[in-house]
Image (tube, grey):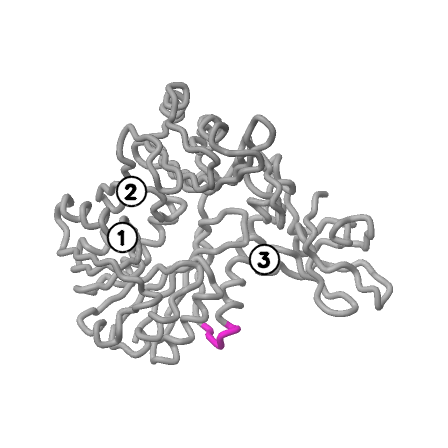
Amino acid sequence: MATANFSSPPSAMAEPQSVVIERLGHLGDGIATGPDGPLHIPLAAPGDVFAPDPGDPSGWRLAKAGPSRADPPCPHYGACGGCNLQHVSAHSYAQAKREWVIAALARQGIKTEVDPLVPVAPGRRRRATFAAMRRGSGVLIGFHRARSHEIVEVPRCLVVRPRLIKALAAIKDILVPRLGHGGAARITITEADNGLGVAINSKPVKFEPLGAPELEGGCIAGIVRASWNGELLYATDTVRLTMSGVRIELPSGAFIQAARECEEALAARVGEALQNARKVADLYCGVGTFTFALARSAAIDAFDADAPSISALVTAARRAEKLKPVAAAVRDLARRPLMANELTPYDGVVLDPPRAGAEAQARQLARSSVPRIAYVSCSPASFAHDARLLVEGGYLLQRVTPVDQFLWSHHVELVGVFQR
């Protein structure tokens, strides 16, 4: 059994004994009670029995599989660090993700209704970031091993859309003449309606124009635009995506929800929460993930720090039909949140901040009179922190819905609904 070296070894203070995994921790590791306190064992499932093994990097070996253990479906599992929960049964997996949300809220003194995990099927992720490194005369592209800089190539991936994997060969051809010895890069690939957008970030030794074979390879792979550190390498078209019936031309590296099914699930719940609102502030709006879903029935003021995303949103809104008025402005809400008095005109707010949360904005919302808030988050911990500020300001957290956007990983997407 492959393991990663990030668990607590058996205590030297007491003779080690076999332990039973009681639950999954919020980082995906199995937690058992040892002689000196909690033990964290990677790639363990509830009910598993582990015995001490000084020869294993984790210090433990699986002695008996528990009822929650499942056979991982991916041949790269255990080597690739992209997933860490394929070995857990579907029931225990869904239960654990819901419990992590409940536990995060409980640590902030909040108890509310948490819905069952909304599932997302395998192979649906349309946006992913790969790691690349120059090795000899070639380039490795894949995902990192857990807690390692080593790259594991993934000729087959059960999480992402197949076109993303098929494009890696063409991207290698682009990288080879531009990455020096030991050079590394991050490649974000987005599958849009009309093809793939590729954003490469690195420090190239030399920046060369694309030759005919690279251009042909990119076209065959369905790449319609490629950029390097924000500079255009080539483009045969704009990168177009439809959100809530509105066509958007995506800027290079623009944030979108990783899976369309997750986007639709979140948008449905945000729309339900704010269905009676007539004027909504869309905070951390990006290119309009929720803007256009809400603009069918409410006037929207959208705010985000990313100027290209705001420009794309405004252009899309001008072209769209049957929308209420949509206005947008570039504003860094972490440094300059909408103040409580600026929030007075709105009877609804939706916010979808980065993983770190939106503390500054939450403090102003807590002082505001906005009747309803829909808060979308990819971090239960930062969401719970901000939720406490809102609850202390007089809001009731009515319910939380976790969505399994990050399949087979310990990450959880969610949407929480607040009522003043």
Task: Inspect this view and state whether residue 168 appears.
Answer: no
Residue type indicated by callout 1: Ala
- Residue labelled with disc 2: 250
Say what secondary structure mark 3 lies in. Answer: loop
Residue 89: x and y, percent? 60, 48
Residue 376: x and y, percent? 37, 60
Q: Out of 224 and 15, give the one closest to the viewer.
A: 224
Marks 2 and 3 sit apart, C-alpha to C-alpha, by 32 Å
As displayed, is residue 326 above or below residue 87?
below
Tell whether label 1 touches label 2 (CB within 8 Å): no
Image position of 294 (left or right of 319): right
Residue 63: x and y, percent? 78, 50
Q: Nearer the viewer, mark 2 or mark 1?
A: 1
Marks 2 and 1 sit apart, C-alpha to C-alpha, by 12 Å
Residue type indicated by callout 2: Leu
* Residue at x 64% of width, y 51% of height: 68
In the image, the segment drawn in magenta is 106-111
Residue 371: x and y, percent? 25, 73
- Residue labelled with disc 3: 27
Residue type indicated by callout 3: Leu
Q: Out of 251 and 103, give the one closest to the viewer.
A: 251
* Residue at x 32% of width, y 62% of height: 351
Say what secondary structure mark 1 lies in. Answer: helix
Give the mark count: 3
Determine which of the numbered discs, if any, sits on residue 307 in the image: 1
